[in-house]
Image (spheres, rainbow, N blue to C red):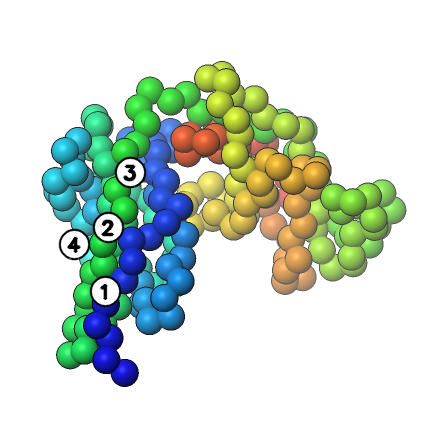
Amino acid sequence: MLNRHAPLAPSGVGAGRNGRGTDVDIEWNANGEGDVVGYRVYRTDALGTPLERACPPASGSASFLQGRLSCVDEGAPPGELHYAVVALDRDPDGNLREGEPTTVPIAEGNTPPAAPTGLRICAGGTDGCVDATGARAPPGTTVLSWDPATDPDGDAVAFYRIYRDGTGYEARYDRLYASASALVWIDDDPGGAEHEYRVTAVDERFGESAPSEAVRG
């Protein structure tokens, strides 16, 4: 089939410094076109002029992100920046083709939320170990719960990020949105092994708190 049109500009793009030095988290929604093969993220200056590719880095082996709707720019310089996200498909000759970009600024001077407290863990199927509805959690699962975090800037906590077996970016395992009925998260696939868990709070501008105290189970 002849592919006449490049991809649309991605929606839901957001970016912000996460509090780990000058690192920036970037996220976006999946494009609706079925022929999109991946995405690229460019770091731009305050005028929107592209400076270099942030995700995947131009120095890396990958030319675009596959199966991902977020990335971290670990090489971000300080100062005012914008990020442009583009979707890619293939033109009629089979060459990679970028669509229109969606560009957003990052917020400066953001203070991340306080670290979540009161992190608790229990094994599904045991007495008193319940899900967000108060029902008994299924056997073979691991259940975390914790107390709400606060933000010194008055920003809303957007979501909580769950880390499993580490605190690096590679240990980011899942998230629970702050609008959930209860701050209860279930690991449906612990794989029959014991894991160490921590939770962070992330505000609307992507500022991320320090990790909570660790629990293991």
SS label for mark 4: loop
Q: Can you say whether 193 is above or below 216 in the image?
A: below
Of the two numbered discs 3 and 4 in the rendering, the one whose residue sits closer to the viewer: 3
The three-letter code of the residue at mark 1 reads: Ala
Q: Earlier in the sequence, mark 2 or mark 4?
A: 4
Q: Residues within 10 Å of mark 2 (few under 14, many from 20)?
A: some
Identified at 33% across, 20% down, the residue is 109
- What percent of the width, then of the height, locates residue 25? 36, 40
Q: Could you say where residue 32 lies in the image, as x and y percent from the top left?
A: 40, 62
Which circle's residue, 1 or 2, is located before the other in the chain? 1
Amino acid under disc 4 = Ser
Badge 1 vs badge 2, beta-carbon distance below 8 Å: no
Is residue 198 in sight in this rendering?
Answer: no
Which amino acid type corresponds to the residue marked 3 in the rendered image? Val
Residue to which mark 1 is pinned: 6
Question: Could you give the CA–CA distance between mark 1 and mark 3, rounded to whole angstroms?
Answer: 21 Å
Q: The disc labelled 2 sits on which kind of residue?
A: Pro
Q: In the rendered image, which residue does mark 2 sit on?
A: 101
Between 211 and 1, the one nearer to me in the picture: 1
Density class for disc 1 (Cα within 10 Å; few <14, some 14-19, many ≥20) is some
Is residue 13 positioned above or below 189 on the image?
Answer: above
Nearer the viewer's eye, disc 1 or disc 3? 1
- Please name whichever residue, 205 or 210, is drawn nearer the observer in this view of the structure: 205
Question: Quick check: 94 left or right of 66?
Answer: left
Q: Is residue 61 above or below residue 185?
A: below
Label 3 sits on a secondary structure element that is strand
Q: Position of residue 157 (x, y in %)?
A: 53, 29
- Gap between marks 3 and 4 measured at Cα: 23 Å
Name the disc covering residue 26, or none: none
In this rendering, position of residue 71 left or right of residue 123: left
